Image (cartoon, helix red, strand yellow):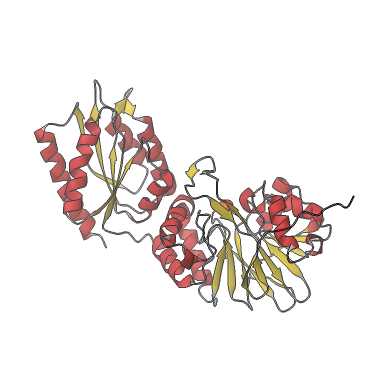
Amino acid sequence: MFAVKPMNWRNIAQISKDIYWVGVRDWDRRLFDALIPLPKGTTYNSYFVRGSKKKALIDTVNPGFEIEWEQKIQKIADPADIDYVIMNHAEPDHAGSIPHIMQLNNKAMLITSAKGAKMAQTFYKVPENRIKAVADNETLDLGGKTLRFIEAPMLHWPETMFTYLVENKVLFSCDFFGSHIAQGLYDDEVEDLIVWAQRYFGEIMMPFRINAQKALEKIKPLELETIAPSHGPIHRNPKRILEAYQKWSAGETRKKAIIVYVSMWNSTAKMIQPIADVLTSEGIEVAKHNLANADIADLAKDLVDARAIILGAPTVLAGAHPLAVYATYLVKALRPSAKYAVALSSYGWAGGAIKHIQEALGSTKITILDALEINGPPNEEHISRIVAMGKVLAEKIKEEK
Ligand code: FEO
């Protein structure tokens, strides 16, 4: 009997001369970090670079996709012949298949930052003699392909770095400039890509805006034809994502308010409705999220460029509703640039939610302009008060640049 070798039908794409996308598409993943919804899945982009003398892989893929990834690499070269594996970031969605490639190949060196070197030993048990730590701006010659390593710490882990391929003008930026969406190889193939990128920025990069600004400054002198992140489409038109990242990392906001609320018996919801309507009538863009079924990555996206936050929460057992507590925690952790907040609350038999929210936001730079806590559903007087609050808030939003 002849053994029939199964057909390797895997597809790869050459994204620039001698640079191949060997990543995988995780169409079905619906949650990241047991926290972030992924309604359109994600990708784990890995790249193969062929120089005249040496071959390198840039980042790997999420555990569980090792065989698909290996089959893609086989389309170009024997995985055992790879000389270098570049680890831009140690998180398992990009580095989790390092043990697989190091087992297939007994000569490849792992190239990473000094902090990454320690993580590669801790997370992936890579022996020290197979790791080379590189310094900021250090280069590696593959033969007509020069890799330059650029430290970009805390985007969003301490060891993060970028790899720039000088001759092809390609920046491999790992999480930075990424988006969680499985569809599309290139940016221009996804109509609303900037929305997905903003969502990603909000959930991953927003707390590190200062580091993001430093990284943008650092890559400014580079000629960039392509930005190849490790999630989502490759930017073959990098101008658009660079401009967006300039705005988001500088904390530029729009005439926009985000409403984040939860309501048990519809009374808090009835307080939210008039302020949403007033703000909209005053020309303010309003993004409304009911925490009972909110997509928190969408909420994070709206926090990126909102100037004000309206929090609505009933009282539960002398404090704010747990979902509102969760939302205030997220606001604190994500560190948006919104300056103003308004808090609205209704209680059944005892208040406390407003005090709880005020305490929770007390340590942020957000000023609570006004708050209203009422018993039961709002009456006409309450509604008039909320309408007035909305008008004051709209003026504040319009005054901001
Ligand atoms: Fe996509 Fe921080 O890993």
In the image, is residue 221 above or below residue 86? below
387 left or right, relative to 258: left
Q: Give the percent coordinates (x, y) of residue 171.
A: 58, 69
171 left or right, relative to 321: right
Q: Nearer the viewer, residue 70 or 143?
A: 70
Q: Quadrant of residue 227?
A: bottom right
Q: Looking at the image, can residue 157 be seen?
A: no
Q: Looking at the image, can residue 185 be seen?
A: yes
Q: Quadrant of residue 270?
A: top left
In the image, is residue 263 above or below residue 182? above
Residue visible at 50% across and 41% down in the picture? 35
In the image, is residue 233 above or below residue 289? below
Q: Give the percent coordinates (x, y) of residue 185.
A: 55, 63
Q: Give the percent coordinates (x, y) of residue 296.
A: 42, 44
Q: Residue furthest right?
A: 1
Q: Residue furthest top?
A: 349
Residue visible at 38% across and 34% down in the picture? 323
Q: Nearer the viewer, residue 27 or 307?
A: 27
In what quadrant of the picture does the C terminus appear? bottom left
Q: Give the percent coordinates (x, y) of residue 253.
A: 32, 59
370 left or right, relative to 178: left
Q: Quadrant of residue 16?
A: bottom right
Number of callouts: 0
Residue visible at 32% across and 32% down in the picture? 356
Q: Nearer the viewer, residue 252 or 83?
A: 83
45 left or right, relative to 3: left
